[in-house]
Amino acid sequence: MVSPSSSSYQLLFCLLVLVFTPFPSHSADPDPLQDFCVADLNATLSVNGYPCKPKSQVTSEDFFFDGLIKEGNVNIGTGVLLALADVQSFPGLNTLGLSMIRADFAPGGLIPPHTHPRASETGVVIEGKLLVGFVTTDNVLHSKVLNAGQMFLFPRGLLHFALNVGEGKARILVAFDSQLPGIALVSTSLFASTPPVPNQVLTKTFLVGDDVINEIKSKFGA
């Protein structure tokens, strides 16, 4: 017969084993199992990413990309153009857990508060002066005005922004630890979703009336 104290020690030992046993985890995209896996963007089957293009169809051009040479054509926020280098524009990034963005700011340009659900972000100011910052889950704002050559870091999933506070244009290069980091703009998600977020939710959230919510939604074409 096992004594109560012996049973307690056995239970404690099992709990300690569970706590200190290393479990496989990933802070970003899973590690690749081959040298490369150039994405087949036309494939009909996808599990978590893109399947590989047959090696016989891979060429050197799959590993080079010139899409960041000039300003992009993706509009975001106010006065900001993005050039994207993710797996959808640069298939060679598939399974490598990497992507980049070039962002060009007009004077006063703003990338509004948003999150990247699948990646942390780091970047360097190439030109101009930017106010960048992020908000922690404790509602603490960490922000700083950066000049050319200075870097910033936004942890995965946290709300962040970038504002051109200089007199001229500004430009940054940004890197992510995901081939497709995703982006969720707070303003667009709340006021321009399809179908729309009910006014009852928004009025209670922001402590305002329907007239204010409808006015904001009209700015987003909703």
Image (tube, rainbow, N blue to C red):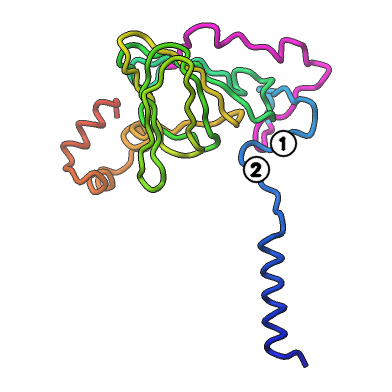
Q: Does residue 200 show up?
A: yes
Task: Tell me which segment is drawn in magenta.
Answer: 45-74
Helix, strand or loop under label 2: loop
Residue 206 screen position, x and y as percent: 24, 44
Q: Nearer the viewer, residue 28 or 21?
A: 21
Confirm whether the magenta stretch covers residue 168.
Answer: no
Amino acid marked by disc 2: His
Instruction: Specify whether 202 is left or right of 54.
Output: left
Q: Residue at x 61, y 28 (%)?
A: 179
Q: Residue at x 51, y 6 (%)?
A: 70
Instruction: Specify whether 217 is left or right of 115.
Output: left
Residue 50 screen position, x and y as percent: 67, 29
> Disc 1 to disc 2, how far (Cα)?
8 Å
Q: Does residue 194 show up?
A: no
Residue 205 screen position, x and y as percent: 26, 47
**Residue at the top extreme of this rendering:** 70
Q: Earlier in the sequence, mark 1 or mark 2?
A: 2
**Residue at the right extreme of this rendering:** 56
- Residue that numbered label 2 is attached to: 26
Residues at discs 1 and 2 in contact (Cβ within 8 Å): yes
Amino acid marked by disc 1: Asp
Instruction: Specify whether 112 is left or right of 158.
Output: left
Indicate which disc residue 131 carries: none
Residue 219 screen position, x and y as percent: 25, 25
Residue 146 placement: quadrant:
top left
Q: Nearer the viewer, residue 24 or 139?
A: 139
Vertical placement of residue 18 versus 166, above or below: below
Screen quadrant of the C terminus: top left
- Residue that numbered label 1 is attached to: 31
Helix, strand or loop under label 1: loop
Vertical placement of residue 78 versus 176, above or below: above
